């Protein structure tokens, strides 16, 4: 059984940094892993994704500020978030995709079939 457990969410001031972690278990392989976020009243949006081959994709709104990485020895996915702003306030979710899609597109929540429970990030100005 695949389990994803996020941690690292917190309340920080604008301009601050956080590192989110996603510990995985039972995930023997994946096509992609990603971070998504959702604010009240808004749809869940893709923030960053990393394919099994190491190709990384970022939402335009976080490029240059967020970095996705994975430590295979610890089975953990990370999201380093720098220069945070109030617009980054959201529940952040880790997800893994173990289904294959011909188009190779994994920057959409509907491509992911395993999800964590989320960790809250609140940025105050």
Image (cartoon, rainbow, N blue to C red):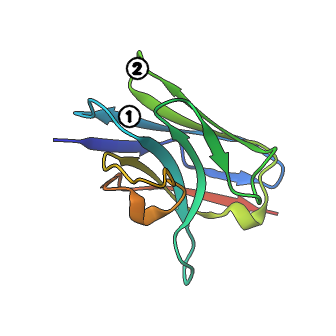
- Marks 2/1 in contact by CB < 8 Å: the verdict is yes
Mark 2 / mark 1, whichever is N-terminal: 1
Q: Which of 17 and 48 is in front in this view?
A: 48
Is residue 1 found left or right of 29 in the rendered image?
Answer: left
Residue at the location (57% across, 60% down)?
46
Q: Which quadrant of the structure image shows residue 29?
A: top left
- Mark 2 is surrounded, within 10 Å at the Cα level, by few (under 14), some (14 to 19) or many (20 or more) other residues, namely few
Residue 90, above or below 47: below
Farthest residue, direction bottom: 41
Is residue 113 found left or right of 36 in the rendered image?
Answer: left
- Mark 1 is surrounded, within 10 Å at the Cα level, by few (under 14), some (14 to 19) or many (20 or more) other residues, namely some
- C-alpha distance separating marks 2 and 1: 8 Å
Q: Where is residue 98 in the image (x, y as percent from the top left)?
A: 31, 45
Total marks in image: 2
Residue at the location (53% across, 50% down)?
35
Element under label 1? strand
Disc 1 marks which residue?
A: 23
Residue at the location (52% across, 70% down)?
44
Residue 96, above or below 44: above
Q: Which quadrant of the structure image shows residue 18?
A: top right
Q: Where is residue 72 in the image (x, y as percent from the top left)?
A: 43, 20
Is residue 97 found left or right of 107 in the rendered image?
Answer: left
Q: Where is residue 116 in the image (x, y as percent from the top left)?
A: 35, 51
Quadrant (top left, top right, bottom left, bottom right) of the C terminus: bottom right
Disc 2 marks which residue?
A: 74
Q: Nearer the viewer, residue 67 or 112?
A: 112
């Amino acid at each position: 059984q695949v389990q994803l457990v996020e941690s690292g969410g917190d309340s920080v001031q604008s301009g601050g940094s956080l590192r989110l972690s996603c510990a995985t278990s039972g995930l023997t392989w994946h096509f992609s892993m990603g971070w998504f976020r959702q604010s009240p009243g808004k749809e869940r949006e893709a923030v960053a994704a990393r394919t099994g081959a190491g190709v990384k994709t970022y939402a335009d709104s976080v490029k240059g500020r967020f970095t996705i990485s994975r430590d295979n020895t610890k089975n953990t996915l990370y999201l380093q978030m720098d220069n945070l702003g109030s617009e980054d306030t959201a529940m952040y979710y880790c997800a893994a995709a173990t289904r294959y899609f011909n188009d190779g597109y994994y920057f959409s929540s509907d491509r992911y079939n395993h999800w964590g429970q989320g960790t809250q990030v609140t940025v105050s100005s």
